[in-house]
């Protein structure tokens, strides 16, 4: 697929390429929108199969960052910084400081935040050159690690889903699968334990499972290839984007499919399979915006208490969208996208009055 075909898919308008050969730095920067405000550019370091795959991922991340902010009515745009390479080989202090120099060229229209393959140590190196960073640890002037508030936001979303679909106001006693227990998945498990849910976890990396096993007695473990056969109330996909194939969808024994990944389905058309089986599909970008709430407050100078209060916006927003989808017959994914795009369009019209 050509670059312009990739961009047309998500209506993205700006795509940049950056290379610094002496540092093994190769970056793709996608800017989806800055209409609502300065863009949150999630930074991801990954060894892609090819450049075509990297371009597609950069554009998708930027697009979903825009959707997430718009659905929550936050004054943030959407962007991404995709870094190509093996994290174990390319990382260095100068590598990330060079990224900071690049960020400064945007004069505050682009803020970097961490994602897969990027650690807080890495982003602190970026901070030696640039102040345009969000989602920082408290020791570096932020409001804490963003995956914590992202997990807390998902809990609010799960409670809204449970109220609508399962007719309960609590997650207590609900059987919940968590597929993928990286930083975010592990934190979600921690939050679910507090909610007294019955949890089953899986991950391809055993060391991640072992960490949770050592902390939590009698937590249920399942092999990755068998996780779709586990009977549960809610299946939370916190692994790779677009991981779940039609074959696996047919095996899911859950009343709800959702999670932290923006889009769990390999093909969005497969939502029809879930509908036939009376499974409610709530794409992750509807419930995973706790980090957006944190970063918006961080950028505006507010504190952690305000973030904690505003996380409940995810509950109301999720419940409203699911209810409207049911009443109108509009598929939830389509309805959420339309709502987000309409809001951006309305804000753009208002700004034209200046």
Image (cartoon, helix red, strand yellow):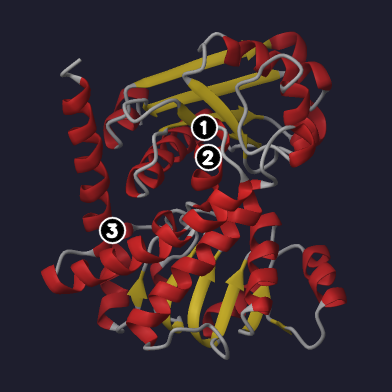
Which residue is labeled 1 in the image? 300
Q: Is residue 184 left or right of residue 159?
A: right
Classed neighbour count for the residue bearing mark 1: other residues with Cα under 10 Å, few (<14), some (14–19), many (≥20): few
Answer yes or no: is residue 50 visible. no
Name which residue lies at 62% across and 27% down: 133
Where disc 1 sits, the SS reads helix
Residue 205: percent from the left, percent from the top? 76, 62
Identify the image quadrant of residue 70. Answer: top left
Q: Are marks 1 and 2 in contact (CB under 8 Å)?
A: yes
Where disc 2 sits, the SS reads helix
| Rendered view: 332 above or below 53 | below
Residue 310: percent from the left, percent from the top? 47, 54
Residue farthest to the left, as pictured: 328
**Observer-nearest residue: 54 or 66?**
66
| Rendered view: 111 above or below 69 | above
Tell which circle, 1 or 3, labels the residue nearer the N-terminal end.
1
Which residue is labeled 2 in the image? 297
Classed neighbour count for the residue bearing mark 3: other residues with Cα under 10 Å, few (<14), some (14–19), many (≥20): many
Name which residue lies at 20% across and 15% down: 354
Q: Nearer the viewer, mark 1 or mark 3?
A: 1
Q: Nearer the viewer, mark 2 or mark 3?
A: 2
CA separation in Å, label 2 and label 3: 27 Å
**Observer-nearest residue: 351 or 339?**
351
CA separation in Å, label 1 and label 2: 5 Å
Which residue is labeled 3 in the image? 333
Q: Is residue 204 left or right of residue 340?
A: right
Residue 62: percent from the left, percent from the top? 43, 35
């Amino acid at each position: 697929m050509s670059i312009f075909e990739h961009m047309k898919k998500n209506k993205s308008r700006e795509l940049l390429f950056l290379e610094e050969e002496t540092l093994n730095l190769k970056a793709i920067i996608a800017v989806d929108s800055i209409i609502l405000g300065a863009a949150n550019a999630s930074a991801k370091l990954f060894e892609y199969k090819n450049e075509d795959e990297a371009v597609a991922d950069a554009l998708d991340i930027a697009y979903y960052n825009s959707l997430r902010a718009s659905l929550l009515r936050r004054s943030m745009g959407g962007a991404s910084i995709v870094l190509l390479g093996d994290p174990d080989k390319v990382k260095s202090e100068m590598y990330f400081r060079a990224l900071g120099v690049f960020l400064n060229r945007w004069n505050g229209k682009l803020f970097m935040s961490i994602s897969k393959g990027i650690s807080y140590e890495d982003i602190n190196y970026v901070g030696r050159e640039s102040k345009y960073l969000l989602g920082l640890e408290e020791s570096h002037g932020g409001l804490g690690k963003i995956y914590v508030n992202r997990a807390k936001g998902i809990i609010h979303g799960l409670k809204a889903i449970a109220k609508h679909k399962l007719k309960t106001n609590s997650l207590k006693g609900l059987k919940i699968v968590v597929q993928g227990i990286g930083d975010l998945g592990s934190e979600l498990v921690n939050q679910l334990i507090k909610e007294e849910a019955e949890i089953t976890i899986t991950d391809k990396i055993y060391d991640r499972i072992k960490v949770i096993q050592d902390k939590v007695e009698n937590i249920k473990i399942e092999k990755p290839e068998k996780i779709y056969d586990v009977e549960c109330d809610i299946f939370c996909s916190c692994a790779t984007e677009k991981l779940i194939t039609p074959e696996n969808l047919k095996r899911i024994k859950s009343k709800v499919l959702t999670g932290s990944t923006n889009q769990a389905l390999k093909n969005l058309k497969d939502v029809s399979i879930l509908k036939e089986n009376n499974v409610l599909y709530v794409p992750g970008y509807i419930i995973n915006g706790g980090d957006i709430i944190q970063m918006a407050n961080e950028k505006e100078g507010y504190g952690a208490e305000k973030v904690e209060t505003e996380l409940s916006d995810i509950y109301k927003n999720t419940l409203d969208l699911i209810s409207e989808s049911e009443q109108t017959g509009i598929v939830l994914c389509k309805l959420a996208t339309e709502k987000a795009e309409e809001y951006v369009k309305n804000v753009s019209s208002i700004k034209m009055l200046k």
